[in-house]
Image (spheres, rainbow, N blue to C red):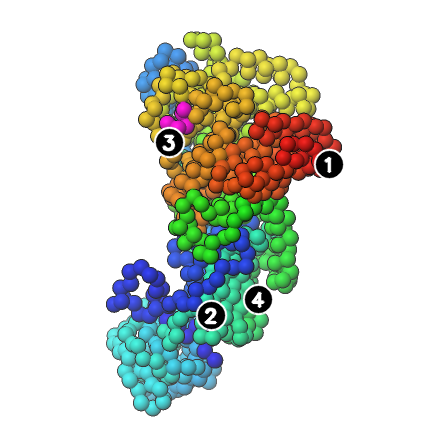
Amino acid sequence: MKKQSIFGAIIFLAFSHAVDAKLAKAEITFTQPSDAPASELALWYRTPATQWEPQALPMGNGHIGGMVFGGVDQEQINLNEKSLWSGGPGASRDYTGGNRPDRTEYLTQIRALLAEQKYEEAARLMPQLMGTRDGFGAYLTFGDLYLDFMGRSHVVKIQASNQQDNEPKELAFDGRSNSKWFTGSTEGPHWIQAKMDSPAVVNGYSLTSANDMADRDPKNWTLKGSNDGRTWNTLDSRSDEDFPTRHMSRSFRFDNNRPYQHYRLDMENHAGIGLQLSEIKFETLGQNSEVQGYRRELDLAEGVTRVSYALDGVSYTREYFVSYPDNVLVMKLAAHPAGNLSFDLRLGSAHPNAETTIADGRLTFRGALTNNEMAFESQTQVVAEGGTITEDAKSLSIDQADSVVLITAIGTDYVNEYPHYKGAHPHQAVRQRVDAASALSYDQLKARHLADYQRLFNRVTLDLNATPSALPTDEALQAYDGNDPALETLYFQFGRYLLISSSRPGTLPANLQGIWNNVMNPPWSADYHTNINVQMNYWPAEVTNLSECHLPLIEYVDSLRPRGRISAKNFYGAGGWTTHHENNIFGHTGPSTSGAFYAPEAGAWLCQHVYEHYLYTQDRNYLRKVAYPIMKEAAEFWLDYLVVDGEDGKLVSSPSYSPENGGFSVGASIHQQIAWDLLTNTIEACDTLHVDADFRKTLIATKNKLDPGLRIGKWGQLQEWKPDQDSPNDKHRHVSHLFALHPGRQISPLTTPVLTEAAKVSLTARGDGGTGWSKAWKVNFWARLHDGNHSHLMLKEQLIHSTLPNLLDTHPPFQIDGNFGATSGMTEMLLQSHMNVLHLLPALPDAWPSGGIDGLCARGAFQVDITWNDGKLTGATILSKAGQMCHVRYGELTRSFATETGGIYELDAQLNLR
Ligand code: FUC
């Protein structure tokens, strides 16, 4: 029986693009192209991933993330743990979360300069009002699980010139560097010879030095090959080699294309004291490197990744998922016929201070970050059926198994608790999780994962009446021209999959890359950017029926308050709390160190999420206990922070900056709109809860004096700043002054047609370009303008120009906000509820003439199913979860009716109750 492992160490994957034949030692060719997987909701590919960013497939449970490559010669799973961050109090005892001591004297001076329109002088003083980045840190990659399927020798018989009784020749092939073959005899020369299970082309080998006496290491030797065990051909000769350290593995390569059944090492007994070797490994090159029917898929319907292929008459399958209920990454590999699964397992990592240990089939990787001493640990348990497992110092070898299950848990000692952010060492918890999961069968683990995952995922179905193309996802994306509703459906659901995978209750929020990061210096620290990015991550949460996936953000916002109070006081002499742009997991709330990132409105923007969770759930207990206290304190900040603009007596934000565009001024539109949003929501919350009557009056009075940030300028545009200075040629990716249109609710075609027109003028001038998230925001904007075709055009732009083959959004680089923003935008085309009315199909594009969507959520705690045909509504079903009054709209038709909790209301195309 041939083994999968009889294959080359240096594998050259043969793709259609350039191949330098001289470099190619061997080729893996992919033949017999696989069919599409059974699941229509699957991303799938006919080759393994070779690059992390555009190709590997993400999976996760909010705590643990994995990116699967699916290689044939080597499987690589890049691992993440969401809290593995440098920075924070562990990095510096003086860590302040970006805050500096009292800066209010500068605030007074800057405000005076801005009031006199001395913008440049104000800008020169602004560094005094900025924070510090000391100890900000960055989100770090954890490491990679490697499964090496090739370059492993399958030796069936060993002969040697001599051996010591207790150190026999077999120990040179046992996979352990702490055992050895020792010739014993001082008579030389010595040789050791291996018979392979079938003729194999060896073109490399490694030798590992043993525990003692460097003089016993081989120095001069020859490697020979033979097919009958008698006539030998010399393949490689070495002289004067040495092994400077004990247990050291050195590799040697040579050219060879011929298969041999026997390989033999002839060694000079150079010191006359005998020879010893800890390990010999032959790197073999397969005779048949034709991989048949390879398929790599991510099945969104199950939250399961799969790889399957056939090689040398053996079928190999792999399945992977990250379970939220058991908090482990699970992977199952199998071979048919049985007994053909062989690989080495190891963990590679960029963390220098970590150690790998192996015991009882478990690989433990444990260490602490040098930067802040954050402790981390992972454990991977190997559970094999059939075959043997041998343990080396840093890796495990699985030989000729029928199937293998790998169970991995990862943890750190981080807890989100101000001011230390430090909890118990993760060892116990990680061990217990792996122990508990190992006690379950793979089928049980999978069933528990499916029950959990599908409970969330299955809540929304989108049917655009389309059959998926027969092409794999990368090719379908390549061929996409704006007319592939099946790909768009997949992309929509992929956004939901990513949220379920990166944001579950009890975890930190999804960061700029969700939870996936393969480096130690990710772009923008893979942090929480709050001038659009983290908010966009959560736009689809409530509306696509993943309300609980919103909670990590809300808990995180709550956790920013202790230090956010210091930010409010030290920079503005204000009460309440706020945060600024760029946040980490250690309560960083101080202003950014860059002017363009100046964003005291970030806390208020985040409060929109805190309140919307209430609007969608109508959970008054949550409003009273969680949301209102956060919002109230944020509003207190604004009551103190707003100043009177001497020009018109209105309350304005000063200093203000429209995110990353323009300069410092007074009353930038987005600051005013966000203040309006927070004041409006907090007043509503007071009304709902019947609390704080006096405070409510103050809020109303403040709102009445507030400049609402809605101003139409000289070319008909909605102004980005209070002065009328917008350029019609400005293509900036941020379109911050349209916050009032989305995600705000000050501008709507239903209520403010003139402002709507101005917003359209501004948006049209900004154009259809932009980075990934910018296009995604424009999908939402055009939907809110009720222009479904333009909204769909932006979706098309995003898919064609800002989407990687694995469907991850690219800014560039990969940044996950665009995925979430697009999923949100697609729902905005089908349902809007921000104007206190369930607006059905407000922006249905021509590209989706018929279809249906089930399970979307609307403010007021309604769940909505909608069907349409020929571009027209055919019916809707509304489930009332809180018995609120229901207002429905379709085109010019409107209907209002009272509902009961749990009541289901069916409407026809004219909105008549059926
Ligand atoms: C905002 C954007 C950038 C980038 C960064 C992560 O600051 O302006 O384009 O997306 O976040």
Please count the marks in the image: 4
Q: Name the residue beneath numbered marker 3.
A: 767
Quadrant of the rendered structure where residue 196 is?
bottom left
In this view of the protein, which residue sits in the foreground, 582 or 702? 702
At label 2, which amino acid type do we have? Ala
In space, the residues marked 3 and 4 are separated at their CA atoms by: 55 Å
| Residue 410 position in % (x across, y down) | 53, 53
At label 1, which amino acid type do we have? Gly
Decide which of tag 2 and tag 3 comes sooner along the chain.
2
- Crowdedness near tag 2: few (<14), some (14–19) or many (≥20) residues, C-alpha within 10 Å: many
Q: Which mark is residue 504?
A: none
| Residue 473 position in % (x across, y down) | 45, 53
Q: Nearer the viewer, mark 3 or mark 4?
A: 3
Is residue 522 something one can see in this rendering? no
In this view of the protein, which residue sits in the foreground, 910 or 143? 910
| Residue 293 position in % (x across, y down) | 45, 66
Dividing the image into four quarters, tell me where ligand 1 lies. top left
Residue at coordinates 37% horizontally, 67% vertically from top-left? 29
- Crowdedness near tag 4: few (<14), some (14–19) or many (≥20) residues, C-alpha within 10 Å: some
Q: Magenta span covers which residues?
A: 761-767
Q: Name the residue beneath numbered marker 1.
A: 903
Q: Name the residue beneath numbered marker 2.
A: 310
Decide which of tag 1 and tag 2 comes sooner along the chain.
2
Please state if 453 lies on the left or on the right of 15 as rendered. Answer: right
Is residue 37 something one can see in this rendering? yes
At label 3, which amino acid type do we have? Gly
Q: Nearer the viewer, mark 2 or mark 4?
A: 2
Q: Which mark is residue 383?
A: 4
Residue at coordinates 47% horizontally, 75% vertically from top-left? 313
